Image: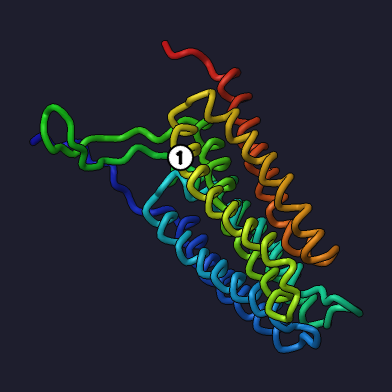
Amino acid sequence: MTAAPDTSAPRPASVRVLAVLLVLTALVTAAVEWLNWYYAEDGGYSLFIRTGWALLRALGFLVLIWHVWAGRPGAAPFGLILAVTTIFSVARLVVPKQGYPPLPGIAGFAVVMVLCLLVIALLYRASGVVGHLTRPRARWVLDREGFNRKVVQARPHAAGWLITARVASISYSALMLVACAVAFGPVFDGRLGRLPLVVVWFLLALATSYVTVVVSYFLLKGKTWAKLLLVALTMTVLAVHLPLCWWLLGLDGLVRDGGPLLVAALLALYGLWRAGRNGRTAPAPA
């Protein structure tokens, strides 16, 4: 067993500031969602489902704190997708089906949006945070020499965008399942003719979860076919999810439940494009 050089160092002040900001964002997001539930006059089953999902999303900021504190390279793409989808999620809860949103809800959404934008700025622009997430670390690894503690280099920038695409694609299934849960509401009210479509939607969401896990694994391995398959999967998911939102949930459901998946899909495709661009422009190793 050989000892690796100690690469540990005190966490920069910007990392500690980001951790506090993430706690604040989680608390404010949960408070705004409760506020919207309090003021809602046309909530019902659909608002209950969407609010419950939004509260789970707020817990995601607490998970992100652990990733940031541990210095995981995936913290930046995870935070980007979490912040962007949170902005969209809170916006769709604040806007009622009819009339104008309450002033406290608008003010709360503005605060959440500012906090999420600050989170993104710190993750990608604060040199202390970026350095903390990309510095080499000593980890225990099992190789031919035995169980040793060795320095592991951070992934290159291109792989960081692949992680963004991976995290975005993994969210497809969850977003589809939320819309399916909302679509079960009319079925419970007696519209049994919609049940077969909802069941097919549900099964496709489950199948998407398994496919994305496998494809995203090989995506990080740099397999070209995985990139092409992820693009095809993204197009297929959009071609299925958006029409079903329109047919089963109406225009309101298309915006509230189709919009978040569209945002995740665009982030995944953008991550693939940036990874390919950085891979072509990266200098060859000496």
Residue 113 can be seen, yes or no: yes
Q: Nearer the viewer, residue 188 or 224?
A: 188
| Residue 275 vertical position relative to residue 139 in the rendered view, above or below | above
Asked which secondary structure carries label 1, the reply is helix
Q: Quadrant of residue 177?
A: bottom right
> Which residue occupies 63% across, 24% down?
277
Q: Is residue 168 placed above or below 201 in the rendered structure? A: above
Residue beneath the point at 11% across and 33% down: 146
Question: Which quarter of the rendering shows the C terminus?
Answer: top left
Residue 235: where, in percent of width, then height? 69, 39
Which color scheme did the rendering employ for the protein? rainbow
Residue 32 in view = no
Q: Is residue 258 left or right of residue 209?
A: right
Question: Image quarter for residue 195?
Answer: bottom right
Q: Residue furthest front?
A: 193
Farthest-out residue, left: 1
The foreground one among 268 and 62 is 268
Q: Which residue does the numbered mark 1 point to in the structure image?
A: 214
Relative image position of residue 24 (x, y in whole percent): 56, 72
Q: In the image, what residue type sits under mark 1? A: Val
Q: Nearer the viewer, residue 221 or 110?
A: 221
Name which residue lies at 81% across and 73% down.
95
Quarter containing the N terminus: top left
